Image (tube, rainbow, N blue to C red):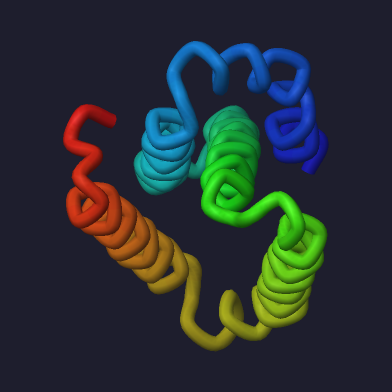
């Protein structure tokens, strides 16, 4: 868990600068790629190092997705609505994290490790496809 925690929060030291350089959409794509790498890495090996590396990549992916997504959210809101947007975003994100934290044990023992990995990969692809489709509909083909 230490590697996951470090992967989530250490990138905040540089992710703001990175966001300015590559933009929110590319930050989200990079986060999705880190998530994908973490799924592939943990699927390829069950060694402790692989688990630690996958947790680190997963944390970095979370960081990039959170920062990129939050940036896009606030760019889409009026200044007077930004505080409401932040509250709604935090409530939604924290609610999903809470539900995932409480359900992971049941899912692991009920479905098994391989099923969770497959569901994670499918979910990741659906999110990536949805984001790409949304960007295309908005006319953003370059990022």
> Residue drawn at (57%, 35%), measured in percent from left and top?
64
In the image, residue 106 sits, relative to residue 29, either above or below, namely: below
Q: Is residue 17 left or right of residue 46?
A: right
Q: Nearer the viewer, residue 76 or 5?
A: 76
In the image, residue 131 sits, relative to residue 15, either above or below, namely: below
Q: Quadrant of residue 36?
A: top left
In the image, residue 85 sits, relative to residue 41, either above or below, namely: below
Quadrant that contains the C terminus:
top left
Q: Nearer the viewer, residue 32 or 37?
A: 32
Query: Whole-percent x and y of residue 54?
Result: 54, 37
In the image, residue 140 sits, relative to residue 130, either above or below, namely: above
Q: Nearer the viewer, residue 8 or 51?
A: 8
Q: Can residue 49 be seen?
A: yes
> Residue drawn at (56%, 22%), measured in percent from left and top?
19
Quadrant that contains the N terminus:
top right
> Residue drawn at (58%, 75%), measured in percent from left and top?
108
Q: Is residue 48 left or right of residue 95?
A: left
Query: Whole-percent x and y of residue 59?
Result: 64, 39
Q: Nearer the viewer, residue 35 or 94?
A: 94
Q: Is residue 85 left or right of residue 113?
A: right
């Amino acid at each position: 868990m230490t590697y996951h925690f470090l992967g989530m929060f250490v990138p905040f030291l540089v992710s703001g600068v990175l966001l300015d350089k590559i933009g929110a959409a590319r930050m989200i794509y990079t986060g999705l790629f880190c998530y994908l790498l973490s799924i592939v890495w943990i699927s390829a090996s069950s060694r402790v190092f692989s688990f630690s590396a996958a947790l680190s990549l997963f944390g970095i992916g979370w960081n990039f997705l959170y920062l990129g997504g939050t940036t896009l959210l606030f760019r889409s809101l009026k200044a007077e609505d930004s505080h409401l947007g932040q509250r709604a975003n935090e409530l939604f994100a924290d609610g999903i994290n809470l539900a995932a934290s409480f359900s992971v044990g049941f899912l692991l023992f009920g479905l098994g490790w391989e099923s969770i990995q497959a569901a994670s990969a499918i979910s990741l692809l659906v999110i990536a496809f949805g984001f790409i489709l949304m960007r295309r509909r908005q006319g953003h083909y370059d990022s």
